[in-house]
Image (cartoon, coloured by chain):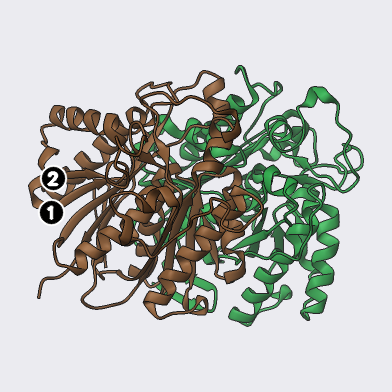
Chain colours: A brown, B green
Amino acid sequence: MIERIGKTIILKNKPTIIGYGSIVGKKEHEGPLSNEFDEYIDDSYFGEESYEKAESKLQKSAVENALKRAGLSSDDIDNIFAGDLLNQCIGSSFGLREFGIPFIGLYGACSTMALSTALASIFVNCGVANNAVAVTSSHFCSAERQYRFPLGYGNQRTPTAQWTVTGSGALVIGEGDNSPYINAVSFGAIQDLGITDTNNMGAAMAPAAAETIAEFFKDTKTNAEDYDIIYTGDLGRIGTDLLYDLMDEKGYNLRCRHADCGNIIFDIDKQDVHAGGSGCGCSASVLASFVMHRFEEEQFKNILFVSTGALMSPTSALQGESIPGIAHLLNIKIDTK
Amino acid sequence: MIERIGKTIILKNKPTIIGYGSIVGKKEHEGPLSNEFDEYIDDSYFGEESYEKAESKLQKSAVENALKRAGLSSDDIDNIFAGDLLNQCIGSSFGLREFGIPFIGLYGACSTMALSTALASIFVNCGVANNAVAVTSSHFCSAERQYRFPLGYGNQRTPTAQWTVTGSGALVIGEGDNSPYINAVSFGAIQDLGITDTNNMGAAMAPAAAETIAEFFKDTKTNAEDYDIIYTGDLGRIGTDLLYDLMDEKGYNLRCRHADCGNIIFDIDKQDVHAGGSGCGCSASVLASFVMHRFEEEQFKNILFVSTGALMSPTSALQGESIPGIAHLLNIKIDTK
């Protein structure tokens, strides 16, 4: 039912993605993945009085879209695994309170989509839950206010800065046939190489991604060529280059089989997002739309999905602390007919 | 291996508490549970430059104490489940980064100790991990600054306010004999009855505790009298009275078999803590010391431990939102010889 090799947890009962849902903001809808998403919002407030309330509504909408696709109601869900970037994770607690589903709150910064999906998959694989939901969100405006400055200040962004994605993605994990399933998961350990620049998150997270991917290759005796593609969450341009260098040092060439959700969700130069997209909602919305569609079209049969998070806070940064990074991994497969 | 009845998850492989560790502050050491704790600190800074860094060190110390008692090193631990009250959970990420253990970050506000222990127990029960650690912490000074005002302001506290415990508790879950084990767990759904007073957390959390306990009684066809005692996390005096009323309405009398960790960690009147203790570190430090000692002395053989959390943030409160509550439950047993 479960086999553990090193840090890698093989899920032999094939917990399956039986539903997925996504919603993004206007800028994300204007990007290259435009029509992949289920829904988009024109208004950053999503009809609410604050960006935080809008973010809660995004998360609720993504879950509703995923439940609808799975043909289930909230009563059919045994546990929901959720988190976001807002202080005290209010995107999740306020967005999901009406569903009445036993709630497992997570904090993994931008790594939360892989974290929530990994836990939901383990629950379903082991019979702890019949159906479980994994969801996360981020919102450019609420993240800017909390981590940097309110938008009205007109703060200048450094070239290494990334653009927090406004969006949410949700998966329903259950038993199913002919759909992509979570074959294996790996939880990363915290990696901290001493990066202190909070405007260069990609650099802080790249070592964690490299460590988690290399450990997975070692545990499973595989290499980059064994996968159709390896997605990282939101390393952006700078973090991606660092990841390649770090993987080279470990003896793995990732270049030909890698893409970063933060690099593909925006047209980086035309949309002026500097080093790329970021935020929990980045990898979540790309996974729960574009990636799922590629599985449906049989372009993907076996991929790695590695969400990456920076576990710092504005307080720790002001106190001179470095930025701990983390990366959790999903191996998603579909059985060929 | 697992049986799910309603929201209740029965863990048939008896994941066992093979180690526990605690550390508290000066005020907690001066309270009624004084010598139950492994360690205490006289200096709120714990030799560090900030309260936040002190809190990280508390969490690290609690884990070290628990590992020592289990006779294990960090290399023996497959996963660590942790969270705290600080923004972006920096108590956990900074406190635990040096251990190198695959890290699962949680946010359940003050419910985190039951949340982390429940997940660690499921992992061990299902063979996902051989050994797993659950830990959480809080610190009066870092919590006051973040949620209310910096201490230097000399802010007045309302009679309903609770005193955040400075402390941390950790459990090591693994395979073992003759020690208390986690017989069942239950994850609560979010309950929000519209309380908006952020100085009355007990009232906001009591409905969640009542719901989780009543559902567990229903699922397992048991009653308060079937347990030696039922601990709640940090409802304090006011929340406890509300819990009794809410349970009366549901047809259960909890009065004779209930204690609240927030009520027993301090001498409420003499120590001027108003409505009682609170914080993730409250139920964690009481569980990983006093409660474990009662099992060792065979005073307890079958208890419920229900940590309670308020999933609000200062931002949501300022935006006029009510306070969502949550409560997760552990059924801890020891086999009688």
Crowd around label 1: few <14 · some 14–19 · many ≥20 (10 Å): some
Residue found at x 59% / y 79%: B220
| Quadrant of the drawing holding the C terminus of chain A | bottom left
Q: Which of B99 and A181 is in front in this view?
A: A181
Chain label for disc 1: A
Q: Is residue A193 left or right of residue B257?
A: left
Residue B25 rendering spot, x and y as whole percentages = 70, 31
Residue tagged 2: A257
Crowd around label 2: few <14 · some 14–19 · many ≥20 (10 Å): some
Same chain check for tags 1 and 2: yes
Residue B181 rendering spot, x and y as whole percentages = 51, 60
The label shown at residue A228 is: 1
- The answer to which image quadrant residue B101 occupies is top left
Chain label for disc 2: A
Label 1 element class: loop
Mark earlier in primary sequence (1, 2): 1
Q: In this view, does A100 lie to the left or right of A128?
A: right
Residue B11 rendering spot, x and y as whole percentages = 46, 68
Cβ–Cβ under 8 Å for marks 1 and 2: yes
